[in-house]
Amino acid sequence: MEHSNIEYVLPGEIETRSFEIIGEELAQRNIHIPKEQEAIVKRVIHTSADFDYAKTLCFSKGAVEIIKELIKNGADIVTDTNMGLAGINKKALARFGGKAHCFMAEEEVALQAKQKNTTRASVCMEQAAAIEKPVIFAIGNAPTALIKLYEMSKEQSWKPAFIIGVPVGFVNVEASKELILNTEIPHIINRGRKGGSNIAAAICNAVLYQL
């Protein structure tokens, strides 16, 4: 039986072909992405099939070089969901001496959140701040995590080394992203409502695969 619209692509070539299609469609839409940001934007589009990211992903000055250097020097990554943690290529990260963490499911976190009448994501950010090395935060779900990072950076001498801020949703999502956009903290933020744990992981992997 003939399927005229089906493209026959070998399994190993599917990703390569996908990236070719993304490149072609970006050109058709007359969208030009700065060279250093290209691999990240394309991987996010590859993960989501959503070309809006080509316009809404915001990079602070020198963001890509900064995050590459952090990973090369063994920085850890902290996510706000176990789904985000699962999506990060931990083997590639370990090559540089880094580890990925998510504290969301820990009993102590749930207990503290209840006592403080706050979210678990918020408590997790406090835990992550105690890691004695530079930390890249990959936030794909909880705007409260971004708000907490902002507050901590203002109130304490501590600052996150880098923030990937791509929470998805409707409550405080856009406002929390704008908070980080207005700081000196190196960041990759997706403006608007879109994002997700898979997007946070895709950004981390796009950087790892370039190293």
Image (tube, rainbow, N blue to C red):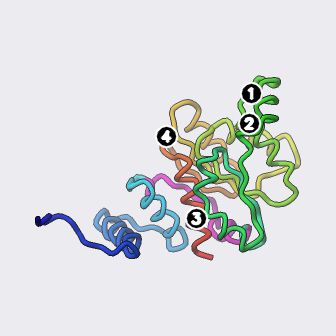
Please give the residue where the numbered disc 2 appears in the rendered image.
Answer: 122
The disc placed on residue 205 is 3
User: Measured along the vertical axis of the image, is residue 133 above or below residue 211?
Assistant: above
How crowded pointer 1 is (Cα within 10 Å; few <14, some 14-19, many 20+) is rated as: few
Read off the magenta span.
Answer: 53-70
> Which quadrant would residue 62 be assigned to in this image?
bottom right
Distance from disc 3 to disc 4, alpha carbons, whole Å, reads 22 Å
- Could you tell which of marks 3 and 1 lies nearer the N-terminus? 1
Q: Is residue 65 magenta?
A: yes
Residue at position x 55%, y 55% in the image? 58
| 103 left or right of 11 in image | right
> Which quadrant would residue 15 be assigned to in this image?
bottom left
Q: Is residue 43 magenta?
A: no
At numbered mark 2, what does the secondary structure look like: helix, strand or loop?
helix
User: Measured along the vertical axis of the image, is residue 113 above or below residue 206?
Assistant: above
Asked if the residues shown at circle 2 and circle 3 are in contact, with their CB atoms under 8 angstroms apart, the answer is no
**Residue 50 seen:** yes
Residue at position x 88%, y 57% in the image? 132
Asked if the residues shown at circle 3 and circle 1 are in contact, with their CB atoms under 8 angstroms apart, the answer is no
